[in-house]
Image (cartoon, grey):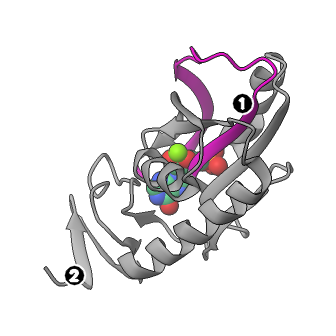
Amino acid sequence: MQEPQTVKAHDLTFELMISQKEIQTKVEAMGEDLRKKYQGKNPLFLGVLNGSFVFTADLVRAFETTCEVSFIKLSSYSGLESTGEVATVIGLTAEVEDRHIIVVEDIIDTGKTMHDFLPTLKKMNPASVAFATFLLKPDAIKYDFPIEYIGFEIPNKFVVGYGMDYNEQGRNLRGIYQLK
Ligand code: IMP
Ligand code: MG
């Protein structure tokens, strides 16, 4: 099937911003970068649900070498806007102590979700923590912390696809689509 140029989610129309092909090329490159640093260290990829389930699946396969994968669920979003409150919905069950942790995010917008989660993670005494985000909105970021691996920097536009949703729709789109 040809990649659609526009899609609908609920009442809104979105247009193609990043194609499936561009995504594949980028994620392969990110996997390779991570491999250079983490090969032989059995890192724990910690995907942040729900949005990062697609990116995490592709990233760990692009990483290729030995690793472990787990997921947590945090939430600060409802509809098109961040609510400003971060709640832990599903906690961390994997062993974090003395492990190299790579937190995998679909998108970092204001940065609040990850900034608030970082102290919780550090209390568990990991050997190291790094962030890998598929998208970053540089104009929206309000919290300062190092983000080691970034797929694409995008304008401050609401997007869906590749795991990301508008009120739960759009997660299964192969490309990234921006609000028209
Ligand atoms: P932050 O706490 O403001 O950085 O928001 C991070 C979370 O909000 C991301 O992990 C996404 O789940 C969600 N989010 C932020 N921007 C968008 C967007 O443009 N589309 C869909 N979800 C988004
Ligand atoms: Mg997310």
The N terminus sits in image quarter: bottom left
In the shown orientation, is residue 134 left or right of residue 89?
right
Residue at left offset 31%, top offset 67%: 174
The residue labelled by disc 1 is 117
Tag 2 or tag 1, which sits nearer the N-term?
Answer: 2
Across and down, in percent, residue 135 comes to 59, 64
- Check disc 2 and report its element: helix, strand or loop: loop
Mark 1 Cα within 10 Å, few/some/many (few <14, many 20+)? Answer: some
Mark 2 Cα within 10 Å, few/some/many (few <14, many 20+)? Answer: few
The residue labelled by disc 2 is 4
The C terminus sits in image quarter: bottom left
Across and down, in percent, residue 150 comes to 68, 64
Q: Amino acid at mark 2?
A: Pro
**Residue 15 occupies quadrant:** bottom left
Q: Is residue 106 covered in magenta?
A: no
Q: Nearer the viewer, residue 114 or 44?
A: 44
The region drawn magenta spans: 79-105
Q: Amino acid at mark 1?
A: Phe
- Check disc 1 and report its element: helix, strand or loop: helix
Distance (Cα) linking label 1 and label 2: 36 Å
* Residue 20 makes an appearance in the image: yes
Q: Nearer the viewer, residue 80 or 173?
A: 173
* Residue 81 makes an appearance in the image: no
> For the image shown, how many numbered marks are present on the structure?
2
Across and down, in percent, residue 125 comes to 84, 19
In the shown orientation, is residue 141 left or right of residue 27?
right
Tell me if the residue at label 2 has its CB under 8 Å from ligand 1: no
Q: Please, is residue 133 above or below residue 128 in the view?
A: below
Q: Nearer the viewer, residue 32 or 52?
A: 32
Across and down, in percent, residue 175 comes to 36, 72
